Amino acid sequence: MHTPHSRSVGGGNAPFSLVCQTAIKHQKKQKKKYSNWKHQHSIQTISYFFSDLMEDNEESEELSEAEEKHHHVKTGEKSLSRSQAESKLKRRTKKSFTCPQCGKSFTRKRNLNEHMKSHTGENLHTCDQCGKSYIFKGSLRDHMKIHTGENLHTCDQCGKSFTLKGSLNNHMRIHTGEKPHKCDQCGISFTLKGSLNEHMTIHTGEKPHTCDQCGISFRMKGSLKEHMTIHTGERPHTCDQCGKSFRKACSFKRHMRCHSGERPFTCDQCSKTFFRADALKDHMKIHTQEKPYTCSLCGNSFSQMGSLNLHEKRHNGVKNHMCFDCGKTFIRDAELKLHQRTHTGEKPYKCSHCDKRFTTSQYLKIHEKIHTGEKPYKCSHCDKSFIDSGSLKSHERIHTGEKPYHCPPCGKSFRHSSSLLNHTKNKCLKS
């Protein structure tokens, strides 16, 4: 007969005490096994997260699967260790993937892969309406709103529309005058954060955008893009009036003023207007009497380098621009072009007050003063005023007695070139 301490369990022959000991051992073994599994799972979590940072979307999906598989194990504790791992690994892997083409850095390899499309042109998302291409499908979706007019964000001040709310917010600062991004070095403020970032490279001397063809570096991405057209031969800016193409946007903008007649740069001394800022700068030397360019042959000085170059060609007798219709040669290309209009009969400049046409814009400008009654050139010796500077100069010779036009055969001098021409034709050659 069995004692209470040695009775059988479940109809078997093993004593109860032995079964209890076996159960305790099994429980300890299971506990240890669980502890090892838990530790291993924690390492897996960190490993999967690291892969998410360093590898592509496929590995990121594996992480999600692993988390789903083990979600029942002390999730609060696991989340804490993951959070710490995330923070640590983010710091370690920040900007670890660098583009070999432009030097831009990324925290994820897949972002670098997406970026590389901008260099290779592979797998871009292209608009079937206008042909514009984008790296990201979402960017194409936003762009398509321009064509469909769907969900556009419109400025209530000027009516301009934007595909993104953020773009409208940035635009509104033009109206409000808000410039929230301030340089801590010099105090200049900017509307956009990107503009501040570009400005900061002035202080740091940083030139992060490097040409992969010749190694020249630039502060701004736009400058690199413009520079690259030297290597590619691309001229992306085409005039719809005459078909001429330009590498630079600023050159194209300047050219368009030829067609529009816009002359935004005005002299504050005589109100003369110019297409270009540098032309105004040169013109101002007339008023300041500054003549920094001196001829090495005769000592004459000029306010503009171009005037000196032209003058020296007259000394050398260089006339390398020839008309193929009549064989006449000219010192300047501009003189040849004007001359060729005598053969073609072209008069592209039309008066807005009458039907008269002119070969040059300057002749048109002088003519239009007849209609307006404007006489801006006033004689410093008397009260007479003139439409153009040439007429004023001729008139002032009456007061000064200057006669700059000489006849070599007889030595006579004249105030006007036309008087010398008449003299040589009618009198001097006959005598």
Image: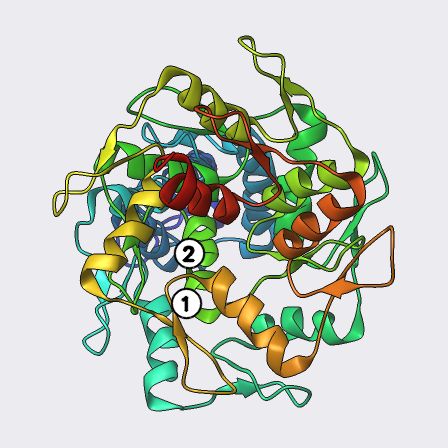
Could you classify mark 1 by the number of other residues whose Cα lies within 10 Å: few (under 14), some (14-19), or many (20 or more)?
A: few
Could you classify mark 2 by the number of other residues whose Cα lies within 10 Å: few (under 14), some (14-19), or many (20 or more)?
A: some
Counting from the top left corner in percent of width and height, residue 182 is at 80, 48
Task: In the rendered view, tell whether residue 88 sits above or below residue 373.
Answer: above
Counting from the top left corner in percent of width and height, residue 210 is at 42, 27
Q: What kind of residue is marked 2?
A: His
Q: Secondary structure at mark 2?
A: helix
Q: Quadrant of the C terminus?
A: top left
Front-lying residue, 399 or 262: 399
The residue sitting at 38% across, 48% down in the picture is 2
Task: In the rendered view, tell whether residue 124 sits above or below residue 41.
Answer: below
Counting from the top left corner in percent of width and height, residue 254 is at 47, 55
Q: Please tell me in which quadrant of the rendered image residue 298 appears.
A: top right
For the residues bearing labels 1 and 2, Cβ distance under 8 angstroms: yes
Front-lying residue, 409 or 280: 409
Q: What is the distance, in whole Å, between disc 1 and disc 2 at their CAs?
A: 8 Å
Q: Please tell me in which quadrant of the rendered image residue 334 appears.
A: top left
> Residue at label 2?
255
> Residue at label 1?
259
Q: Is residue 48 visible?
A: no
Front-lying residue, 426 or 104: 426
